[in-house]
């Protein structure tokens, strides 16, 4: 295929700018200088200086059990079968749940790394990276329903449609590569609450997550329908026509922005597939993520694609593991966790190691989370599954600005309630924004007469987890 | 409660003054007279305690729980939990309860309890009647002081303003020129005619003008041409589609409910079309609002009914649903209703006050619950949700009485037929009595018996029986004693002794069971076999059913459910309620009497009789009895009379069914109706598990606070009246601002959903009121206002003016260029390619309700492609159409007062690569190439269709070489077409196409 001069020069330019530093940064200053007013995605300074530049948000859909993964509860094993009484939202007035009994975890915990933080045998590889993690064992959330809790974890609202956390970060910081969207959600399946998970709601549409579905056309209309030379010929004609039009209408930033958008879209056709094309990755790197050469799906693919996207300046990458079905929602049998964990364990560990050896851990914040935990009890002690549990669950942070190798907060002896230093989802959001250099009380948007924010009127930054 | 009535009295007293148009400078309180010693007790003992321990959080700076203790009115009014104290009654006072630290939900001060001495002081103060000399401090209503609310511009009555005395084209222009003059601005020159027709056609219809329309208008210099153009566009059905969509944006229209599984709402489209039709009919805006709030009540009052008025309440019914079991989160749905109503009609954000008094606007916590009570007294159609899949509480299109009247005409032919059927039935019945007497007197029982459940009996009548023509053999199967009755298989063979003839029930009946009853025998003798409801003697089973229960070959005769006779005419077993073997005949008696199979002899012969009777549905304790009788008299004549009537009734039943199917249906609509009327409690912090004091239903205090006249209804009727009362200045101001916004690009108030203190003040307040006054003069009709605005110079001026002078174009010294909306973009592409289907959209092809099983794991997620205009596309709430999301379409989850306009590269990808875009461009080219063979003519046609103008010299300079560059000698046709397609894409992707000057 012959390439147009326009394309060649653009690619050369991009390559050279990528080469000049770790995360895209030659472009940044140029773009910051370019007419910011008309460009909602122009890079913006954070509220206070931080090294963090990008977020990789790993979302495990369905509710991961904390007591089987990152929150060891020996007392739960010794008290297995003991009857307990709570007014729990998932068991209240539920037929067959008149009595509930403690239920021991199905996996063994071991101290890992120099920090000795205990991780279960479900996550042997992530356990190996535990010295890089800040494990928060005292998260809790406001709803025990998938849809509402998923919405809450993404938007801070448990009922209403609101901008998602990725949109807020994009709105707060803009993005560093105009050839790519600022917020990318790699979601092979649709999650609970659907597109609201990456929607921008009242924030300008430029901040909505662009959904990437692994496959031949990962973004809507990304695949070229014409040979590049023909496309370039049409774009040249379009540029000429638009220039004539613009000549009579000088000073209109919207017209100029749209003319520019075609140039960047043209580039995106190559930049995005290039970012998502793992062919140039060495075998050793593929192996790190548990990928076979040529593989174009699976969580390992999502993780490596995420690294390549943040390297190219994408501000926020969300990776959704599974979707609204076939997920971590192990009511029937916790063995589902045993089936799902290996799908993500090695890829996540690979991502952490890869970021680290590339010197990106300072610039990328990695968040691992889920919508809620699972009950440390059930209606019989030998019930194989666990129910939804919003009183306590575990998530972890790693990378930019996070204190590594520590545990924050604790649940009670059975993992039922977050009792020490509880962290609500709003606090979690406040902390993530803080790590990105954003004050959650100042990141506001005026809509319908009110200044809205991700944390609504709540949220306290968990300072203990900051490095 | 004493304190409530005290507060209520204060409120009523003040409202009386408000209504009289005189606001009190200070609240007229009815507090007990305070003696001097009371005052000094307060000053020396109470005030220090309040200052030290309470006012930091409940004073001028902060009002935690909406409570202020720094004024007398503050504690009288109380906070979100009601009045802070009841004078003279410490044990009933929240304040005293709070300082006692006994109630875990209410402990004040929260960190450390007061000293016993301070507690005693406050208790004594309340005991003494709470003397409080403090009268200073402004009285607050929500987030404003009363004085500020009184002075706020948008609550002022509409004053017909004086048009500035300036030489201007129109009153509108005079108002604008006055403001421009203050800033040394002058209006832009008029736009050229091509620009103007493109502008106004998109503005009023959302579609481009045709090339012919553009040329006709461009050539017509008559000053009346523009007026005629506007009139034509306003009369076009596309006007309602364009302007109805503006309203649908505001009311967050969607075709799904939005709860966790996003159930489809198959009836929602009727509300959508009602909105479109209301705009086209220019329904007065006050009536438009009243119908949407209380159309069901107007419909119920009318004699003939008015289904469309019920459909209008879809405005309320399409409110978003929340959660897993939506019945549990209806308080959130009501917030959506109150908030959407407030923003769309009044320009006020009322939803904030669900949890606390509005922080900025004069909307109190009680205001919210006064309206919440109206909607909690209203029954909303229920769309289904994960644990309750079926719809319920849909609203019948007519009341019972209306329906009876409405249906009476169409029902006439059916009634006439039924009269004839009744007569035939009576004739038939009159034949049966005498027939039964005759047969009873001439019956000879040949055999009888009973079988237990699961058993069978085979019998042969030992002696041959002599039968004569018209005599009958009857095999009757009845319930066995008190044991009920069951499906019973029978076989029956009658054979002439000489072997010359035989009759077999299976051979004669099964193959062609539904052919008739009575049924012919295999030799062609008519009316030989009779299937009888034997409770009444010789009454034929009259209802035939073929392929019963959807089972091919399962054929039935019956009267009601039973008695019945059933055959399996197939060669396979059919398993229904029981297993029916291939080629079998069954009967089922009625619980109270027998079913029978009769054979009426066509010959004179001596016959042998063999039969079996077998339980066809083993299980339980039932069984059947049977009897075989010989009727020894000639029944030919009376049976013929019976058969004549029975056969007519059966044949006519089909005609009757067709007439019945053609009757109008009493539709069930997705609207609202009256529920159980009751005032609602305030919900403390918005939490339904924390109900507080009951709030009487009433109108917003800042707009008069009118109480319900009649608390027997929900209050929606009054609400509809309050919203559209001439005394409410918000409704007309908000509406005319929207008209201005959509015509001129931005409202006179640039926050069209917020006329409160957080919104922007009007740039031209007098013009806003002039428009509102014009609205009243036009009896709330919109089209006269459209004309007034469209006929102004301001609307007709050019946009080709330096935008840096007034970048926001606040003073309208030029026309604001705008991008096409996603609907306009898609509709235009379909229009220019000739594929736009212009008929009005109807229902969507949703799956049948009986098949629903949506869940949060597997929500409703279908899409239904259409070539109709974009507003007819099915809209989901939880899975937004990616194209609509990409191009800033309206959010179907919350009111959208104006489309945001973002320009991002992923939009440009649509113009580069979207298959739809490429296809429409190709179809456009097919038409252009088919119509013209000459390149110049083709170019003119293509430019006219896409950009509504002929190509200029500058265009020709590049388009010709561009086309030429595609031509190759080998494959002329194909390459020529490819070049034109490329050119079409360039034009359709251009800024000139996407932006309106």
Image (spheres, coloured by chain):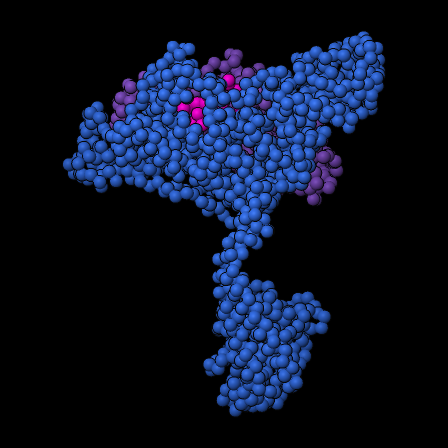
Q: Which residue is located at x 54 percent, y 56 percent? A: B408
Which chain is painted in blue?
Answer: B
Q: The C terminus of chain A lies in which quarter of the figure?
A: top right
Residue B757 in magenta? yes
Nearer the observer, B966 or A204: A204
Q: The N terminus of chain A lies in which quarter of the figure?
A: top left
Seen in the picture, residue B307 relative to A56 is either above or below; the reply is below
Q: In the rendering, at what x and y percent does residue A354 appear? A: 47, 23
Nearer the observer, B19 or B733: B19
Main structural element of the magenta stretch: helix, strand or loop?
A: loop
Q: Is residue A34 visible?
A: no
**Image quarter of residue B615:** bottom right
Q: Which residue is located at x 25 percent, y 40 percent? A: B926
Q: Is residue B19 visible?
A: yes
Query: What residue occupies the far left of the structure in this picture?
Result: B969
Which chain is painted in purple?
Answer: A
Nearer the observer, B406 or A221: B406
Residue B232 left/right relative to B269: left
Q: In the rendering, at what x and y percent does residue B677 appear? A: 67, 38
Q: In the rendering, at what x and y percent does residue B174 appear? A: 40, 18
Q: Which residue is located at x 77 percent, y 16 percent? A: B112
**Image quarter of residue A105:** top right
Q: Which residues are magenta?
A: B739-761
Residue B240 left/right relative to B966: right
Seen in the picture, residue B493 relative to B724 is either above or below; the reply is below
Q: In the rendering, at what x and y percent does residue B604 appear? A: 53, 90
Q: Which residue is located at x 50 percent, y 18 percent? A: B760
Residue B313 in magenta? no
Q: How many marks?
A: 0
Seen in the picture, residue A45 relative to B928 is either above or below; the reply is above
């Amino acid at each position: 295929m012959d390439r147009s001069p326009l394309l060649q020069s653009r690619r050369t330019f991009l390559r050279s700018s990528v080469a000049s530093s770790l995360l895209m940064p030659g472009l940044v200053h140029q773009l910051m200088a370019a007419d910011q007013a008309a460009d909602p995605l122009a890079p913006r300074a954070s509220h206070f200086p931080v090294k963090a530049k990008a977020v990789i948000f790993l979302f495990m859909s369905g509710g991961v059990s904390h007591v089987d993964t990152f929150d060891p509860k020996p007392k739960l094993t010794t008290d297995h079968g003991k009857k307990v009484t709570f007014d729990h939202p998932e068991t209240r007035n539920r037929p067959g749940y008149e009595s509930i009994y403690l239920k021991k975890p199905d996996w063994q915990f071991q101290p890992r790394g120099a920090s000795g933080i205990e991780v279960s045998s479900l996550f042997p590889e992530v356990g190996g990276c535990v010295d890089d993690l800040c494990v928060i064992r005292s998260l809790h959330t406001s709803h025990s329903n998938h849809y509402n809790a998923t919405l809450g974890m993404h938007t801070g609202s448990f009922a209403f449609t609101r901008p998602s956390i990725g949109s807020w970060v994009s709105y707060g910081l803009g993005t560093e590569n105009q050839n790519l969207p600022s917020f990318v959600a790699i979601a092979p399946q649709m999650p609970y609450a659907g597109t609201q998970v990456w929607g921008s709601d009242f924030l300008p549409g430029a901040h909505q997550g662009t959904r990437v579905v692994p496959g031949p056309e990962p973004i809507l209309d990304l695949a070229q329908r014409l040979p590049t030379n023909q496309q370039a010929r049409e774009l040249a004609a379009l540029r000429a026509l638009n220039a004539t039009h613009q000549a009579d209408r000088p000073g209109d930033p919207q017209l100029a922005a749209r003319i520019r958008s075609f140039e960047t879209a043209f580039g995106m056709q190559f930049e995005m597939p290039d970012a998502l094309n793992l062919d140039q990755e060495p075998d050793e790197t593929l192996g790190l993520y548990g990928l076979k050469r040529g593989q174009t799906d699976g969580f390992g693919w999502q993780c490596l694609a995420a690294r390549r996207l943040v390297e190219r300046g994408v501000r926020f990458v969300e990776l959704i593991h599974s979707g609204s079905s076939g997920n971590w929602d192990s009511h029937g049998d916790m063995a589902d966790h045993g089936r799902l964990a290996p799908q993500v364990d090695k890829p996540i560990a690979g991502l952490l190691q890869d970021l680290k050896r590339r010197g990106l851990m300072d610039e990328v914040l990695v968040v691992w989370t889920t919508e809620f935990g699972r009950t440390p009890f059930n209606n019989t002690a030998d019930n194989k599954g666990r129910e939804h549990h919003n009183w306590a669950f575990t998530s972890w942070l790693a990378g930019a600005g996070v204190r590594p190798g520590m545990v924050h907060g604790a649940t009670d002896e059975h993992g039922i309630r977050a009792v020490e230093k509880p962290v609500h989802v709003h606090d979690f959001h406040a902390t993530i924004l803080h790590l990105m250099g954003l004050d959650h009380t100042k990141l506001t948007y005026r809509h319908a007469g009110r200044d809205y924010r991700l944390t609504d009127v709540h949220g306290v930054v968990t300072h203990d987890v900051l490095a | 409660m004493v304190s409530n009535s005290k507060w209520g009295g204060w409120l009523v007293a003040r409202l009386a003054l408000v209504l009289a148009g005189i606001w009190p400078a200070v609240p007229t309180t009815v507090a007990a007279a305070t003696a001097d010693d009371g005052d000094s007790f307060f000053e020396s003992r109470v005030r220090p305690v309040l200052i030290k321990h309470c006012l930091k959080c409940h004073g001028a700076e902060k009002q935690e729980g909406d409570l202020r203790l720094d004024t007398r009115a503050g504690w009288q009014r109380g906070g979100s939990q009601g009045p802070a104290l009841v004078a003279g009654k410490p044990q009933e006072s929240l304040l005293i309860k709070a300082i006692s630290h006994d109630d875990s939900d209410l402990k004040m001060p929260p960190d450390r309890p007061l000293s016993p001495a301070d507690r005693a002081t406050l208790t004594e103060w309340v005991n003494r009647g709470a003397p409080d000399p403090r009268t200073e401090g402004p009285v607050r209503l929500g987030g404003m002081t009363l004085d500020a609310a009184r002075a706020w511009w948008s609550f002022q009555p509409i004053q017909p303003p004086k048009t500035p005395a300036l030489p201007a084209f129109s009153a509108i222009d005079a108002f604008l020129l006055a403001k421009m003059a203050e800033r040394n601005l002058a209006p832009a020159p008029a736009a050229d005619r091509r620009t103007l027709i493109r502008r106004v056609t998109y503005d009023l219809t959302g579609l481009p003008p045709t090339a012919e329309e553009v040329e006709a208008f461009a050539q017509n210099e008559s000053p009346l041409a523009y007026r005629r153009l506007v009139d034509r566009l306003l009369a076009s059905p596309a006007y309602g589609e364009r302007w109805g969509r503006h309203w649908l944006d505001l009311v967050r229209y969607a075709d799904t409910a939005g709860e966790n599984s996003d159930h489809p709402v198959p009836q929602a489209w009727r509300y959508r079309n009602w909105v479109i039709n209301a705009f086209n009919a220019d329904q007065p805006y006050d009536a438009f609002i009243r119908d949407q709030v209380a159309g069901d009540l107007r419909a119920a009052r009318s004699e003939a009914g008015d289904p469309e008025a019920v459909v209008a309440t879809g405005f309320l019914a399409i409110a978003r649903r929340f959660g897993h079991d939506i019945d549990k989160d209806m308080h959130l749905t009501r917030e959506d209703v109150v908030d959407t109503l407030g923003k769309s009609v009044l320009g006020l954000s009322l939803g904030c006050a669900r949890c606390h008094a509005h922080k900025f606007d004069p909307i109190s916590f009680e205001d919210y619950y006064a309206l919440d009570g109206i909607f909690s007294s209203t029954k909303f159609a229920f769309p289904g949700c994960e644990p309750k899949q079926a719809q319920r509480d849909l609203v019948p299109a007519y009341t019972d009485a209306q329906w009876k009247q409405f249906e009476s005409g169409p029902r006439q032919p059916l009634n006439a037929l039924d009269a004839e059927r009744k007569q035939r039935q009576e004739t038939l019945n009159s034949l049966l009595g005498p027939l039964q007497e005759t047969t009873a007197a001439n019956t000879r029982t040949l055999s009888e018996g009973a079988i237990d459940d699961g058993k069978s009996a085979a019998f042969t009548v030992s002696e041959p029986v002599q039968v004569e023509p018209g005599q009958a053999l009857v095999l009757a199967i009845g319930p066995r004693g008190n044991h009920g009755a069951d499906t019973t298989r029978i076989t029956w063979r009658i054979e002439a002794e000489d072997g010359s003839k035989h009759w077999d029930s299976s051979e004669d009946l099964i193959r062609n069971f539904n052919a008739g009853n009575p049924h012919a025998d295999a030799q062609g003798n008519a009316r030989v076999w009779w299937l009888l409801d034997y409770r009444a003697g010789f009454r034929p089973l009259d209802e035939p059913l073929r392929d019963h229960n959807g089972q091919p070959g399962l054929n039935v005769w019956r009267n009601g459910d039973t008695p019945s006779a059933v055959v399996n005419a197939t060669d396979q077993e059919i398993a229904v309620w029981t297993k029916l073997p291939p080629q079998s005949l069954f009967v089922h008696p009625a619980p109270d009497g027998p079913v029978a199979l009769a054979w009426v002899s066509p010959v004179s012969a001596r016959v042998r009789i063999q039969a079996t009777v077998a339980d066809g549905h083993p299980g339980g304790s039932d069984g059947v009895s049977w009897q075989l009788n010989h009727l020894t008299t000639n029944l030919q004549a009376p049976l013929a009379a019976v058969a004549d009537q029975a056969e007519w009734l059966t044949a006519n039943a089909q005609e009757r069914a067709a007439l019945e199917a053609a009757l109008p249906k009493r539709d069930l609509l997705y609207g609202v109706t009256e529920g159980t009327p009751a005032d609602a409690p305030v919900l403390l912090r918005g939490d339904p598990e924390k109900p507080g004091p009951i709030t009487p239903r009433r109108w917003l205090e800042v707009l008069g606070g009118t109480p319900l006249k009649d608390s027997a209804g929900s209050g929606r009727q009054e609400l509809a009246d309050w919203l559209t009362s001439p005394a409410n200045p918000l409704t007309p101001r908000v509406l005319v601002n929207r008209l201005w916004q959509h015509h001129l690009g931005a409202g006179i108030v640039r926050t069209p959903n917020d006329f409160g203190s957080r919104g922007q003040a009007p740039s031209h307040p007098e013009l806003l009121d002039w428009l509102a006054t014009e609205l009243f003069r036009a009896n709330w009709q919109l089209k006269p206002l459209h004309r007034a605005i469209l006929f102004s110079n301001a609307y007709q001026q050019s946009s080709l003016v330096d935008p840096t002078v007034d970048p926001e174009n606040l003073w309208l010294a030029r026309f604001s260029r705008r991008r096409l909306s996603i609907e306009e973009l898609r509709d235009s592409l379909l229009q220019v390619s000739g594929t736009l289907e212009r008929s009005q959209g109807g229902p969507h092809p949703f799956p049948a309700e009986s098949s629903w099983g949506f869940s949060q794991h597997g929500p409703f997620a279908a899409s239904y492609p259409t070539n109709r205009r974009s507003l007819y596309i099915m809209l989901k709430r939880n899975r937004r159409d990616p194209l609509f999301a990409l191009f800033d379409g309206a959010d179907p989850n919350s009111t959208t007062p104006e489309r945001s306009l973002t320009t991002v590269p992923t939009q440009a990808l649509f113009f580069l690569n979207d298959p739809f875009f490429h296809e429409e461009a190709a179809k456009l080219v097919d038409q252009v190439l088919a119509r013209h063979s000459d390149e110049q003519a083709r170019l003119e046609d293509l430019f006219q269709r896409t950009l509504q103008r002929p190509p200029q010299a500058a265009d020709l300079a590049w388009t010709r070489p561009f086309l030429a560059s595609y031509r190759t000698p080998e494959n002329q046709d194909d390459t020529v077409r490819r070049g034109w397609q490329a050119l079409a894409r360039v034009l359709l992707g251009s800024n000139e196409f996407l932006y309106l000057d």
